[in-house]
Image (spheres, rainbow, N blue to C red):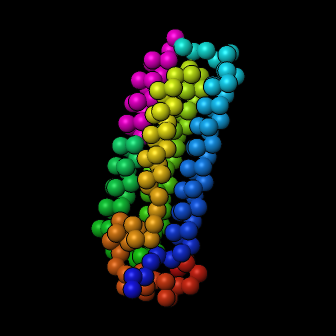
Amino acid sequence: MIMHPSPPYIKMLKVLHVALLTMQVLSVLAMFSLVYFNFTNSFELGNISNELLIASVFIFAIAYQGGETLFKRKLAAARESNLPAFKKMEVYRSAHLMRWAIMEFAAILCTIFFFLTGNYYIILIAALLIILFFTTKPGAEKTLADLQISAEDMEKWTAGNDSGNE
């Protein structure tokens, strides 16, 4: 039987992931509704719509690639270190938070660009970022694989540490 990381760590990451994802989806829906029902007449920036579309594409590419690169670097550092399992989990949590913050910033910025211009291609970029954000959902098996923590190490940690902290 595989022992999974301490439930508080995984549950906390899952709750945070859902909260951030929900905020992004709600903001896209709100901005889409405002534009669709023509509540943005005073913000007609159609003359810079193409520039903001190009900026959105670059923001998307930089945010996604940058977030993934930083996440992988932090994971590699945690794997190569001789840190105990609970310290690796802290590094894992901070790596996720960093990646999610970068991706959410880009999605919200694209959503604002859409609101200002009414360019539906920009909202598609924000939607793509949200879909990619969804794919970063943490899980117990994924955590063990990402950190390369053996089930035995995790079992020692959870057995000797009921509170989830050391």
Say which of 64 and 135 sits in front. Answer: 135
Q: Please name whichever residue, 112 or 164, is drawn nearer the observer in this view of the structure.
A: 112
Compared to residue 47, the image places residue 66 above or below, namely below
Numbered marks: total: 0
Residue 153 seen in this snapshot: no
Residue at 52% over, 11% down: 47
Query: Residue 57 lies in what quarter of the image?
Result: top left
Residue 139 % position (x, y): 45, 66
Magenta segment: 47-63
Q: Residue 26's spot in the image, x, y percent?
A: 63, 42
Task: Name the residue furthest top.
Answer: 47
The image quadrant of residue 108 is top right
Answer with left or right where residue 153 lies relative to residue 39: left
Q: Is residue 166 left or right of residue 55?
A: right
Report the front residue among 54 and 72.
54
The N terminus is located in which quarter?
bottom left
Q: Is residue 53 magenta?
A: yes
Whether 92 is among the magenta residues is no
